Image (tube, rainbow, N blue to C red):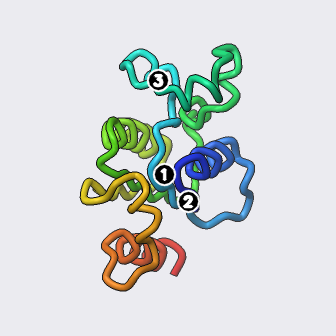
């Protein structure tokens, strides 16, 4: 599981096959699934532009480029109401079933980018309940 930049790293490592034996992925609120699409759609905020300034490296650092027909662990994708999060998360989620991967998408539009992380684990938190249900259904 990872949030924001951690979400990007978990998605990248999971899609590259660097997590052997992992039963599931929980991805919590990033836009860094596909920087080329992000740049085309005007979503390259300064934070992404600084970290991913060398476009020749994008292919190595983007989870979306590794979705190539392999089956990946069941994947839970959550997004907040932060600009573009829903669209980018949905676009990434749509690529995975074609590879035979079970995907659960959580609409976290009730959360900000920070509260979706901060509230996780709290009693009666909707994301926590959904993530636990996902884990119970996928890994027992």
Q: Nearer the viewer, residue 136 or 10?
A: 10
Q: Nearer the viewer, residue 48 or 26?
A: 48
Residue placed under numbered mark 1 in the picture: 101
Query: Percent x, y for residue 91?
Result: 37, 36
Label number found at residue 131: none
- C-alpha distance separating marks 3 and 1: 28 Å
**Mark 3 or 1, which is nearer the eye?**
3
Badge 1 element: loop
User: Residue at label 3?
Assistant: 44
Q: Is residue 30 above or below residue 120?
A: above
On screen, residue 83 above or below 59: below
Question: Which of the marked residues, 3 or 1, is nearer the chain's N terminus?
Answer: 3
Distance of label 2 from label 3 (alpha carbons) = 25 Å
Q: Which residue is mark 2?
A: 25
CA–CA distance in space, label 1 to label 2: 11 Å
Please give the name of the residue rendered at 51% of the width and 60% of the height, measured from the top-left corner: 26
Q: Is residue 137 left or right of residue 125?
A: right
Label 1 CA crowd tier, 10 Å (few <14, some 14–19, many 20+) = some
Label 3: few (<14), some (14–19) or many (≥20) C-alpha neighbours in 10 Å: some
Of labels 1 and 2, the one closer to you: 2
Q: Position of residue 79 (x, y in %)?
A: 37, 51
Q: Residue at x 39, y 43 (%)?
A: 89
Q: Earlier in the sequence, mark 2 or mark 3?
A: 2
């Amino acid at each position: 599981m990872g949030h924001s930049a951690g979400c990007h790293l978990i998605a990248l490592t999971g899609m590259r096959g660097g997590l052997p034996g992992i039963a599931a992925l929980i991805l919590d609120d990033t836009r860094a699934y596909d920087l080329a699409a992000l740049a085309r759609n005007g979503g390259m905020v300064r934070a992404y532009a600084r970290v991913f300034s060398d476009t020749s490296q994008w292919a190595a650092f983007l989870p979306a480029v590794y979705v190539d027909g392999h089956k990946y662990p069941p994947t839970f994708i959550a997004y907040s109401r932060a600009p573009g999060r829903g669209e980018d998360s949905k676009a990434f989620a749509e690529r995975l079933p074609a590879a035979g991967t079970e995907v659960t998408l959580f609409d976290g539009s009730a959360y900000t980018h920070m509260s979706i992380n901060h509230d996780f684990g709290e009693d009666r938190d909707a994301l926590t309940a959904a993530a636990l249900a996902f884990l119970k259904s996928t890994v027992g």
